[in-house]
Image: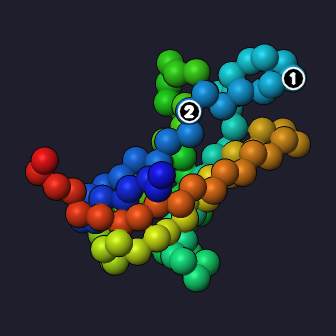
């Protein structure tokens, strides 16, 4: 199932429960950012910093801006990169742009 990016709205990009599996501890001091890319791989936004959410267990959040010119039903990718020391985590999520419904 694809994630949904709401056209004309700010959208939160979240990385939850970032953990150092070797040490079994949450990572609350990583440098985390994301890029929003179109289907051709062109960057529409980013790299955009993602802030650590105080009091959480490894949660980082960033914002896809409401002013981006997204195309309804187009597929985009959100690429999240987290760096902690010499360790790098990379995640890519596919998302489709849609208008929010009132349902």
- CB atoms at circles 1 and 2 under 8 Å apart? no
Residue at the spot 88% in from the left edge and 43% down from the top edge: 86
Numbered circles on residues, count:
2
Residue 25, placed above or below residue 51: above
In the shown orientation, is residue 51 left or right of residue 68? right
Category of crowding for the residue at label 1, using alpha-carbon neighbours closer than 10 angstroms: few (below 14), some (14–19), many (at least 20): few
Residue 73 position in % (x across, y down): 35, 72
Outermost residue toward the left?
Answer: 102
Is there any visible trace of residue 7 in the rendered image? Answer: yes
Q: Which residue is mark 2?
A: 16
Residue at the spot 58% in from the left edge and 82% down from the top edge: 40
Circle nearer the N terminus (1, 2): 2
In the shown orientation, is residue 78 left or right of residue 81? left
Residue at the spot 26% in from the left edge and 58% down from the top edge: 9
Instruction: Determine the image quadrant of residue 70.
Output: bottom left
In the shown orientation, is residue 33 left or right of residue 63? right
Residue 80, placed above or below residue 22: below
Residue at the spot 48% in from the left edge and 52% down from the top edge: 1
- Looking at the rendered structure, the secondary structure element under dot 1 is loop
Residue 27 position in % (x across, y down): 70, 27
Residue 75 position in % (x across, y down): 46, 70
Residue 103 position in % (x across, y down): 13, 47
- Looking at the rendered structure, the secondary structure element under dot 2 is loop
* Res 22 label: 1
What is the C-alpha distance between the residues marked 1 and 2? 18 Å
In the shown orientation, is residue 100 left or right of residue 5? left
Residue 60, placed above or below residue 101: above
């Amino acid at each position: 199932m694809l994630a949904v990016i709401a056209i004309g709205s700010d959208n939160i990009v979240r990385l939850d429960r970032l953990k150092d599996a070797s040490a079994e501890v949450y990572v609350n001091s990583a440098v985390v950012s994301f890029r929003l890319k179109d289907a051709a791989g062109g960057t529409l936004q980013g790299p955009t910093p993602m802030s650590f959410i105080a009091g959480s267990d490894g949660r980082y959040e960033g914002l896809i801006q409401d002013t981006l010119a997204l195309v309804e039903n187009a597929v985009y990718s959100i690429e999240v990169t987290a760096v902690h020391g010499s360790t790098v985590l990379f995640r890519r999520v596919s998302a489709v742009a849609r208008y929010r419904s009132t349902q």
